[in-house]
Structures are given as C-alpha cells and as structure tokens.
Amino acid sequence: MHSLGIHTGADLKERSLLELTHHFGKAGQYYYKIARAEDDRPVEANRVRKSIGAETSFARDLSDHSEMLQELEQIAQIVEQRLEQHETRGRTLTLKVKFSDYQQLTRSKTMLAPISELSRIFEIAKALFESIDPENRSIRLLGISLSNLDNAKQTQVIQLPLFQNRGVIF
C-alpha cells in the first residue's frame, strides 16, 4: 500500500473501487468498504463473554509500594462487582502491569475452583504483583481480569462422602 501512496485511512478512502480491486483483487472491495465504514457483517450482540476485568491508568506514575497495593485492591473491588453483576466467577486471574517506560508484564494463575470474592481476587493479584518485583520501578497502569468464566447460577459443588473399605479410605 505504501508504494501506492496509501498511508492512512483517508488515503485509502480517496481510491476508487476499480483501482483498489485492480491492485488487491477481492481484498480491494473490502478495503474500499472498510475505508467508508461500510460493514454488512451481522452484529453478534449475544456473544459469550470470555473474561471480566478492570484496569486503571494513573494520571501520575506510582512509585510507592503501599500506594500500588491500595490501587490494586480498588481494581479488585471493581472486578468483584462486575463478576457479581454478571453472576459469574473465574478460574484464571491475570494481572497486568505497565511500567513508566511502557514495558508491560502479565502474570496469570489458574485455580482449581472458580473465585469471585474480593479477598481471594486481591490475595492472588497481590501474590502475582509481588512476584514481578516492582521495586524501584514506577507503574503507569494496573489491571486484573478473570477468565475461564463459570456461571455461578449453574455451578454446584458436589461433595461426595468418603467411605471406608477394609481400613482403606476411598
């Protein structure tokens, strides 16, 4: 595209359908329509949610460790509220950290049982946060998300009784 002088969406919009199909074949029609915000694909409004989370970009970079943990707990509260609103829980917690130099790290942990309680969300997020050793680094963004979602209404924990057979517990 650059060799044709197309560097922006506005440049693409200036080109005719004939010119774009000449240079790009079938894709030319797609480029022509997309540059004009024409998209006739059906909207999938009821898609299955894959994760729920929250993140905060800070107006000033955080350098105080206790302030970072305080912000992390506030984000965990938002995640808990969103999980409650959607009546779901998640098994994989992902922590996102972006430093002042824009380096981004993510750390994840998958639990055996789904979680949705603030105390567990914050506990796991804090452990993941401590594992990245943020000492002497300023933080620009923190985020927490839960995936491997499980509809809390439909999930039941089934406890099976243990029984003993000839001194061996099964």
Image (cartoon, rainbow, N blue to C red):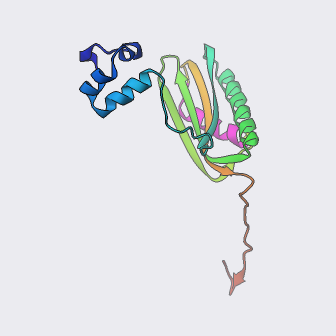
- Which SS type dominates the magenta stretch? helix
User: Does 132 lie within the magenta span?
Assistant: yes
Q: In this view, does 48 lie above or below 164?
A: above
Q: In this view, does 36 lie above or below 160?
A: above
Residue shown at 54% from the left, 19% from the top: 136
| x and y, in percent, of residue 108 in the image | 55, 41
| x and y, in percent, of residue 129 in the image | 59, 33
User: Does 150 lie within the magenta span?
Assistant: no
| x and y, in percent, of residue 125 in the image | 63, 37
Nearer the observer, 84 or 27: 27
* Left or right: 64, with 133 as reference point: right
Residue shown at 61% from the left, 39% from the top: 45
- Residue found at the very far front of the displayed protein: 18
Q: What stretch is highlighted in magenta?
A: 120-134
Could you say which quadrant of the image residue 60 lies in?
top right
* Image quadrant in which the N terminus is located: top left
* Image quadrant in which the C terminus is located: bottom right
Could you say which quadrant of the image residue 162 lies in?
bottom right
* Left or right: 102, with 45 as reference point: left
| x and y, in percent, of residue 75 in the image | 69, 30
* Left or right: 19, with 70 as reference point: left
Number of numbered discs visible in the structure rendering: 0
